[in-house]
Amino acid sequence: MTFRRKLLAVFSLTVFLSVAGVALLVLTVTRNAFEKTENERTAALVAQFQREFNRRGEDVARRVESIAASDAVTRMATALSGTPADSAEYFDLARTLAESYQLDFLELLDGHGIIISSAQSPAKFGYPDNAFDSLAGLTEQSAFLKLEDLQDSTALGLFAVRAVRSGDHPVYVIGGRRLDKNFLASLDLPPDMRALLYQNRGEHFSPEWLLDAGSGTSRPAEKLSGLVDAVRRYDQEMTGIVNWSGDQADQEVFHAIPLRGVGKDRPLLAILLIGNSRRQYVELKRRIRDAALLAGGGGIVLAILLSSWAAARVTRPVEQLAYAAQDVAAGNWNSSVEVSGHDEVAQLAESFNRMTTELLAQKERLVQAERVAAWRELARRLAHELKNPLFPLQLTVENLIRARTQSPELFDEIFQESSRTLLAEISNLKGIIGRFSEFSKMPQPQIQRVEVNEVVSRVVQLFQAQLKAPGRSAIACKVELDPSVEPIGADSELLHRAISNLVLNAMDAMPNGGTLTLGTRRDDRKVTITVSDTGTGLTREECARIFTPYYTSKQHGTGLGLAIVQSVVSDHGGRISVQSEPGRGTTFVIELPNNMEALRAALSNAERNATETPDIRRNVAAQSASVDRR
Amino acid sequence: MKHIAWQWLAISSVLIAALAASAETRPQYGGTLHVSMLDAPLSLDPADRATPDSFGRRSLTELIFETLVSVDKSGRATPVLADSWQTRGGRRWQFRIRHNVWFHDGSPLTAESVAASLRFANPAWNVTADRDSVIVESDLAEQNLLADLALSRNAIAKRDSDKLSGTGPFHIVDWQPGKELALGAEENCWRGRPFLDGIEIEMGRGFHDQMTALQLGKADLIEVAPEQTRRVSQQGQVLVSSAPMELLALVFGQDGSSPDEKSLREALGWSVERGSMRDVLLQGTGQATGSILPGWMSGYGFVFPTTADLARARSLRDQTHVSANWKLGYDGSDPMNRLLAERISLNARDAGLSLQPTSGGNADLRLMRIPLASTDPWSALQIALAEIGLPPMESKGHSIEDLYAAETAVLATGRVIPLFHLPVSYASVSNLKNWSLRPDGSWNLGDAWLESARP
């Protein structure tokens, strides 16, 4: 990843995390604030409902009181206090009064709890009211809940009891309003709020007993069973959230209030469920979230754009520096960068430019120094090489002069002998000069398809006789060739010369005999050639300098053999290394690339040239066929 | 002397008051009578069997049409369109048709028209015309023929396509089936022109609406529900009631299939508190009964018990090996029916029986109101049995013993549990004069007149 992208990623991540953190913080704070408000609203609504509920109870009590104080009931009470009392004519009075006073339930009972008239069950006249014993003592109380038995069902209602006394025979007025859908619908409730009534019948929750004054939207009432069962179990007010669907906006908070009847055990007659829709809250929360996401997203996009611009601005000089450094690494020490501004990056660019300038100067100085050192070494080596044959020459010439003057009778014989010596030394000088000349004229490799194992085998074969030559300690030769080594593109002759030099070097390192090992190995996209000896070995310093031209550790070496080897290997794109320990021998490792691309390029060049030379064309054609076969 | 003067003063005051009263009750022609009724018949044809019998229908029929004979309260036949009759052993009856009687379309009443009308109403009868007489013949002696001929369904009508003509005091002016009927005074009525110019009858009105219409002056004559009669009379309104002519009974759809079933039905009969229902729900109107025919008609009604015996009902219930779980159907158009059904259900529950009131059609037993068609007990019984869905009873004679035996046999089937005999009651404005009820509970407005307000 580039520095610019990293910088961009860091900028973007920072902005994203900042925006996300702020959005999360806003959402959390908002949610907490709204939930607090929502809870307060629900509590207020529940309180409002309870006030409304109590108001309805007071209304029922007021109506019952009015009925008890009405002329009709007073007349009836007076008439029934006489003897004999005939209550038949009042049979329909309860219905009439209930209609007039808008009550759903109204019963007129005599002092023994016998029904004189009933609006809800007119046919029950003369029957005792089963709840009379518990109701007779409630004549001064406000409204209460009661389950009323009807002809074929029961109904829940808000009731009040009042007594009318005329003489010793009281008449009880028990009136009430039904707690049904109409009652729930008539409650003055705010929008998004509704009241449901669950009539507590049976042991288990049943949707049949749930009254809902809602708009008829079908919602599975079973989802309220948990809350209802909890209220039944713990007999206290509870609050719960009901998920009507997968949409959070359909959630509804229900506050369940147990409604108890009268009597000793105050039975749980019903559970009032006050529902408060969370739609408004959820939608508001969604709007805030959407706004936060929009702002955050926009901010992130803007931040990315700005970051991109800033990163580009910041990283451009750095990139220029990086490119310049790459140039320097590639050897182009003339590279420099443009300096703009006065910030740290500009200072870095100035420093870089100074550094490259200094490096260039240092390089020049180093080259000069190396050149001088090389010349000195060359001069030393030349002096050393030339001094050895010159000294015998001088002695031979001085010997001839002396023989001419001191022993003329022996001059011819001495002259003959001295001539041979002079010729031998002159030949030696020519050899020295020829080797130097040869090193200076190293040819460029002619890339061809070369079987490395074959080249190694030829070298071994060439030196086989010398290894076992009389007069010197025998050297054993081991050849470990990897048959999987594939042909490479190389110059067969140069490669042969390089390996031969290494073999000669190894033989020189084993004056007392030893073992010479040549091997090949196939590695990934390259071929490795090893030449090992069990000779005297090299020190670390010798290893470091052994490929330097004209450096030799031998008494009579020119120091050019391994330099030639390194030059050949380098010309083939390979590398040579040495592993050695004093006394344990030395191993030279040549790693050559397969150079097939170079071979193809060479063939391609040769093909172009072949148009001029038919023989070359034929050669190239043969080489191409050979390459293709591989 | 002073004492004599006071006597003269008293006598003269009485004479003056009597003269004044005589002046006020003098009949007046004119005026239209407005009547409201609960029934809403869809046909005025007296022979239309698709329209159920009711007191209202009888009243309408007898305003427009007349029968050959009529039966008084004691069951004796009196001539109407037939001025005389004779029979040979009850198998051949010859009725001499009254002369100078005209249908409302202007055609004279003839023996042929009478025979045609009777054949239309009774296709099984052998009716022929012989000059000015109509002869009815049968293989068996028809002891009840006169009572049958007095039924409103046998009123004489002339049917020309869809137009009906009768010989009654009023003819049809406008007829909207089930809604309204306008009648006009028949100038050529053989009894003489009625005092009223016309009658406008509004049908299908509930008892409460009728009472409201009467109190608002929008109706002159209305029907009164049995439970309202006491209140109406206490309010000083003019109230006219018939003899108890309507049977209120529990009728099972089928015979009791097993002894247990019959025992349960008997238990139900013993559980019903007829007394308290009559006193409270019916406000003292009507008579509790255990028989189909009212006591005033049969003379033996008191023999059948009417008081509830809950212990006996429970005992009968406990002796059975099946449970009673009946549905009691009732006509929901009358609130009283619902109250009665609920009370019966409560009584039955006390006896351990389950009775579920329902106004729907699917019921095991029904609370039925059966208007007794005739003051003749045999005729009334046979027609009531037909209403209940039982076959007619056959009897060799028409003695009271035969009647008792027949009725006992009917009750033994367990198909019917008689509860009450109810009168039919009407309330009218005070200026409607000289109207009465016939023995069959229908209005008799032929001689009625409206007293106009004093200027």
Image (tube, grey):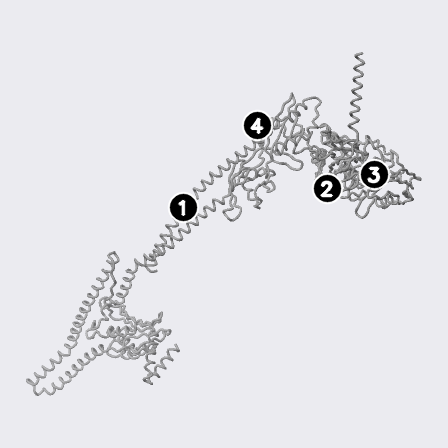
Q: Residue at x 93, y 40 (%)?
A: B88
Chain of the residue under label 1 = A
Q: Which residue shows up at 50% across the image and 35% down it?
A: A47
- The mark found on residue A26 in the picture is 1
Nearer mark to the viewer, of 4 and 2: 2
Mark before the other along the chain sequence, 1 or 4: 1
Location of residue A447 with respect to B173 vertically, above or below? below
Q: What is the secondary structure assignment of the residue under circle 2?
A: loop
Would you name the residue on which mark 2 appears? Answer: B179
Q: Chain of mark 2?
A: B
Relative placement, left or right, of B389 versus A328 is: right
> Which structural element holds mark 1?
helix
> In the image, residue B37 lies at what x, y percent?
74, 37
User: Which quarter shows the N terminus of chain B?
Assistant: top right
Looking at the image, how many numbered discs can be counted on the residues? 4
Q: Name which residue type carries label 4.
A: Gln
Picture disc at residue A141: 4
Residue A28 pos. (x, y %): 42, 45
Q: Amino acid at mark 2?
A: Lys
At numbered mark 4, what does the secondary structure look like: helix, strand or loop?
loop
Identity of the amino acid at label 3? Cys
Quadrant showing the C terminus of chain B: top right
B142 lies above or below A596: above
Q: Amino acid at mark 1?
A: Val
How much space separates mark 1 and mark 3, taking CA atoms? 100 Å
Q: What whole-number distance in Å separates the C-alpha atoms at marks 2 and 3?
A: 26 Å
Q: Are marks 1 and 3 in contact (CB under 8 Å)?
A: no
Give the foreground label among 2 and 3.
3
In this rendering, which labeled residue sits more in front, label 4 or label 3?
Answer: 3
Instruction: Report crowding for label 2: few under 14, some 14 to 19, many 20 or more residues within 10 A (C-alpha).
Output: some
The residue at the far left in this view is A405
